[in-house]
Image (spheres, rainbow, N blue to C red):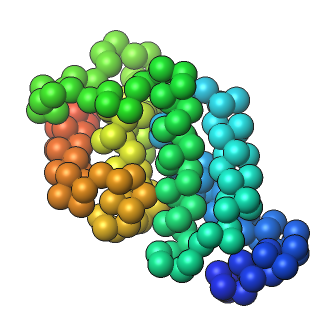
Amino acid sequence: MFDEKEVISRILRGDFRAFELLVKQYEKLVFYVVNRLVQHLEDKEDICQEVFIKVHQSLYKFKFQSKLSTWIARLAYLTAVDHVKRSKVGYLMDYPENIEDYHFTNHNPEAELLKKDTAAYVNLLIGQMPLLYRTVLTLYHLNEFSCPEIEQITGIPEGTVKSYLFRARKILKEKVEHDLNN
């Protein structure tokens, strides 16, 4: 059982093994958040390391006003968004004015192969979605954060989070149904 308060207390006293426990506990969460926002593998690895450096340097500021996972996910999100903004690739506001008119990339040979593996195919499609939609989907479905927690992580108002979730699920469902029936 991972006891946040005990582990944090040990880390703040300089126990490096306790920090290793924290990293093991949250490395998948950090990777999932970063993975959806950042394109290149080398960048993903660097950003994940940067997140844990920030966690270590800032842990004394954590006041248990949210879950530790929410706080770490927010650091991961903000670090990844900063990287995206600096690299100008897939800029944060990368979403169409009318998501109902959004179209996925066509004629992708990888997509054709993945149609046989529905989960992998859905992941590929999520990766093609506009940044904010794929972020919200990832945090909600893969990391099982609630809408209020996603608001804390991203700064996107809860109502907008719900709207993004609804729209993203709708276009994803329509795309999967269309492709798997053809």
Q: Residue 29 in the image: state x and y as whole percent.
A: 57, 58
Instruction: Say whether residue 83 is visible.
Output: yes
Most distant residue in the front direction: 61
Q: Is 73 placed left or right of 45 in the picture?
A: left
Q: Residue 72 in the image: state x and y as whole percent.
A: 57, 61
Residue occupying the point 71% across, 78% down: 8
Q: Residue 15 in the image: state x and y as whole percent.
A: 88, 75
Instruction: Say whether residue 32 is visible.
Output: no
Residue occupying the point 68% across, 68% down: 59
Q: Residue 103 in the image: state x and y as whole percent.
A: 22, 23
Residue occupying the point 70% across, 29% down: 42
Quadrant that contains the N terminus: bottom right
Tally the numbered discs. Answer: 0
Q: Nearer the viewer, residue 170 or 30?
A: 30
Quadrant that contains the C terminus: top left
Q: Is 2 placed left or right of 69 in the picture?
A: right
Q: Is 90 placed left or right of 22 in the picture?
A: left
Up/down of 147 relative to 100, above or below: below
Q: Is 139 placed left or right of 171 in the picture?
A: right
Quarter where residue 146 is shown: bottom left
Up/down of 161 relative to 128, above or below: below
Residue occupying the point 62% across, 69% down: 61
Up/down of 29 relative to 124, above or below: below
